[in-house]
Image (cartoon, rainbow, N blue to C red):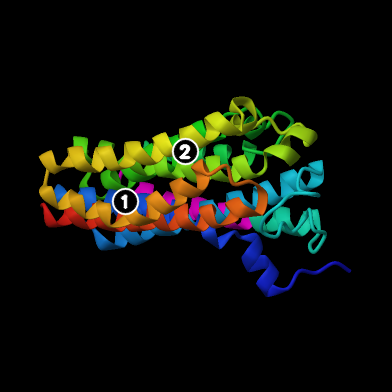
Amino acid sequence: MVMATPAQWIEGARPRTLPAAISPVLVGTGAAAYLDGFVWWKALLALGVALALQIGVNYANDYSDGIRGTDENRVGPLRLVGSKVATPRAVKTAAFTCLGIGAALGIVLCATTTWWLLVAGAASLLGAWFYTGGKKPYGYRALGEVSVFLFFGLVAVLGTTYAQAERLHWSAVAGAVSVGAIACALLVANNLRDIPTDSVTGKRTLAVVLGAALSRRFYAALIAVAFVLAAISVIATPWTLLAFIALPLAVKSTRIILSDAVGPALIPVLKLTGLTELLYAIGLGLGLALGS
């Protein structure tokens, strides 16, 4: 009987992607504090929703890619189904369990704020599953970055802000766009590494469509957008310059991307980009809170 170890389940949850879930909540909470609307328990609920959905989508992608054979010869961290250390049924159950937890926490958040947030929550759940699931996954149609920008940028940041402050501000929108841009860069780096295997298996990611050279430039542009927006946000408060604590890591990851690194040489970029996003969010979120 195939049974993954606890360590393999943790690795399958892809811990390096978790900054993409934590970061928008940090920025959204900072924006809420800027509006004098910080509510600590709603911030924790939003964080729980984000983490549960992120882990859920990771397991869902593992399951869907695994049963299609996309992950059989990939380069990178462990995939449970593709490596045959866990059954597809077990991974699918784990995905639905995490998505269910996220949905339950989201319902509590909606019930204490406004029910129209359920629309965003339902869209997030559908987006999580159909990214690589279903008969026509949109992640195979070069729409992954659009989804990441929407759900891990706009929806997550603005939803977190509104759930607490019950209003928005342009600084929250700038934060949402910047966090979404870095989250997109993380996916671009991942898909850039996987171009050889994705091309063979028919997974038509944006990196496959653009090609390696344009994908590298796109990554650099996304990182640049985030720091430009942090600089513009000084109009709201000069404290937003704290986001630049992430600049050294961003420069390091961008240099690797632009150096024509391929395969395993790109794996460190995922960690660097994730840490860039987390540090950026800590700096920007704290900056907005201090500027309240």
109 within the magenta span: yes
On the image, the x and y values in percent for residue 260 come to 57, 42
The kind of residue on which mark 1 rests is Thr
Q: Please, is residue 291 above or below residue 192 in the view?
A: below
Q: Which residue is mark 1?
A: 112
Q: Please, is residue 193 above or below residue 135 in the view?
A: below
What residue is at 41 percent from the left and 44 percent from the top? 182
Q: Which mark is residue 219?
A: 2
Q: Is residue 117 visible?
A: no
Q: Nearer the viewer, residue 115 or 230?
A: 230
Q: Residue furthest right?
A: 1
Q: Is residue 102 visible?
A: yes
On the image, the x and y values in percent for residue 223 come to 38, 41
Question: Cβ–Cβ below 8 Å for labels 1 and 2?
Answer: no
Q: Residue furthest bottom?
A: 6
Rounded to the nearest whole Å, what is the CA distance between mark 1 and mark 2? Answer: 38 Å
On the image, the x and y values in percent for residue 68 come to 80, 41
Q: Nearer the viewer, residue 123 or 82?
A: 82
272 within the magenta span: no
What residue is at 38 percent from the left and 57 percent from the top? 278
214 with respect to 238 (left or right) = right
On the image, the x and y values in percent for residue 178 come to 33, 40
What residue is at 67 percent from the left and 49 percent from the top? 263
State which tag comes first along the sequence, 1 or 2: 1
The kind of residue on which mark 2 rests is Tyr
